[in-house]
Amino acid sequence: MSATTASRPTFRNLPRGFGLIIALVVLIVAASLISPHFLNPINVLNVLRQVALYGILGVGMTFILLTAGIDLSISSIVGFVGVVAATLMGMGYPILLACLIGVGGGLLIGVINGLGIVIGQVPPFIMTLGSMVMTRGIALMIADGSTVNLGPRGDEFFFLGGGFILGVPTPIWVFALVCVIAFVVLRLSPFGRAIYAVGSSPEAARLAGINVGLVTFSVYLISAGLASLSALIFLSRLSVGDPNSGVGLELEAITIAVIGGTSLFGGEGGIAGTIGGAMVLAILANILNLAGVSPFSQQVVKGLIIVFAVLLEAGRRRRA
């Protein structure tokens, strides 16, 4: 190989995540050209709020994908937790107690998923698909197929999803806190290193003394917990518990994680990329909304993004 060829820059030599940064810059410039309203402070805050709402779910999905798993039940957990918490608030329960019981119900779904996958050896796709259908059905039964009003406590609870702290929407602060904790766990703790090891090779992780079953169980519990947190934020914003709330959010979470560089094959990815993926998806959705594209067409675009990202990842793994 000549010195010229060896010194020639290639895409392989670019830092990981560089492509995501370029995509964000291109999207921001394109959005500014398409609509003068994009950089309006109100619109920017709306975009950041969307980043937070979907990004929390994306963080949970990142933990799952790093172990080469998948969680389809998070969308139903959002609806289920919202209905449970709204029902209890409407019955006069204190807001904090209603929220804790609702989150407890969401965590129980995570426990069921984890036990089914670890002990029952049910493939994650099948296990979480069954949980998704079951949980949605329970939510519909509790709400009797309709929405549940929060009652007089709706105004008190609005702050979590619709309030502001220092001029910044509360969900953004919540998302930032979740990201910091998740980053520390994944990058600076033995548990985080165990997650990457399990995703890279479960057998090698087991031989290294890692409790593969416990790690796998834990990530489904984390995913359910973050989905429950998202449910409370959605409930606060909507002021009603909707059993159909969250439909399709599992695809949003997968898209965010995959765009951010988390591999569907496990063992590769991180929170920084997930934040970038959430920003890309939120900005893209905002551009499509400003351009008047229908929500149905937007689903097509998101589906194409998932397929394209997976093809790129598969191609990269083959080259490696």
Image (tube, grey):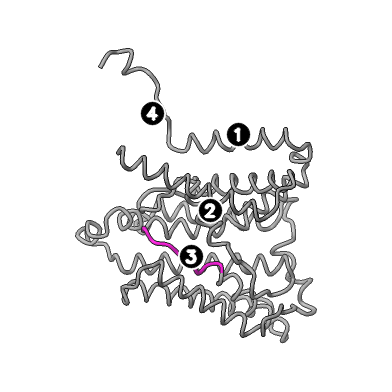
Q: Which residue is mark 2?
A: 179
Tag nearer the camera, 1 or 3: 1
Q: Quadrant of the N terminus?
A: top left
Q: Which residue is mark 4?
A: 13
Classify 10 Å Cα crowding around label 2: few (below 14), some (14-19), many (20 and above): many
Alpha carbon distance from label 1 to label 4 = 20 Å
**Secondary structure state at the residue bearing disc 1:** helix
Image disc number at residue 25: 1
Alpha carbon distance from label 1 to label 3 = 30 Å
> If you read the primary sequence from the N terminus, does the residue marked by circle 2 or circle 1 appear first?
1
Amino acid type of the residue that numbered disc 1 sits on in the rendered structure: Val
Alpha carbon distance from label 2 to label 1 = 22 Å
Image disc number at residue 58: none
Classify 10 Å Cα crowding around label 4: few (below 14), some (14-19), many (20 and above): few
Majority secondary structure in the magenta region: loop
Q: Which residue is mark 3?
A: 223
Tell me where the magenta segment starts and ends, as one range. 68-75
| CB within 8 Å, label 4 to label 2 | no
Alpha carbon distance from label 2 to label 3 = 13 Å
